[in-house]
Amino acid sequence: MPSGSARRRTDEIGLPLVDKFVSFDITDGLDPETGKTIADLHQRRYDTDPDLTELVSNINQYEGSAAPGPHAA
């Protein structure tokens, strides 16, 4: 998975082209808190990057942990 500026640039170019987006995380860990930990990571990313939050909010249909804006559960 890209990180830092490469990931950011991918988001800027790709997300405006997306109509439906489903995000899911897979782990082989047994910790029942893993889902919450991953959702917290996503939430921190949205909280610290309003431009990313806007890009994701503009997607017609988004499903995933910590979905921002109009997609929030």
Image: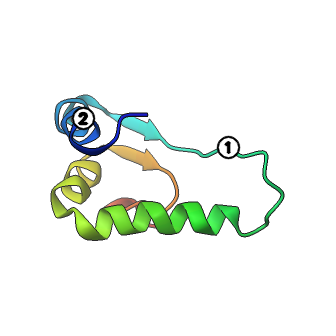
Given the image, on which type of amino acid does mark 1 rest? Ile
Left or right: where 23 falls relative to 69: right
Return the residue at label 2. Answer: 6
User: In the image, residue 4 lies at what x, y percent?
Assistant: 27, 45
Query: What residue is drawn where x is 42% and y is 38%?
Result: 21
Q: Picture coordinates of residue 54 (x, y %)?
A: 19, 56
Residue under the point 72% across and 69% down: 33
Residue 17 visible in the picture:
yes
What is the crowding at mark 1: few (fewer than 14 residues within 10 Å), some, or many (at least 20)? few
Q: Nearer the viewer, residue 39 or 18?
A: 39
Above or below: residue 18 compared with residue 22: above
Relative height, residue 48 to residue 27 (above, below) = below
Mark 2 → mark 1, Cα distance in angstroms: 23 Å
The residue singled out by tag 1 in the image is: 26
Q: Nearer the viewer, mark 2 or mark 1?
A: 2
Which amino acid type corresponds to the residue marked 2 in the rendered image?
A: Ala
Q: From where the camera sits, is residue 73 visible? A: no
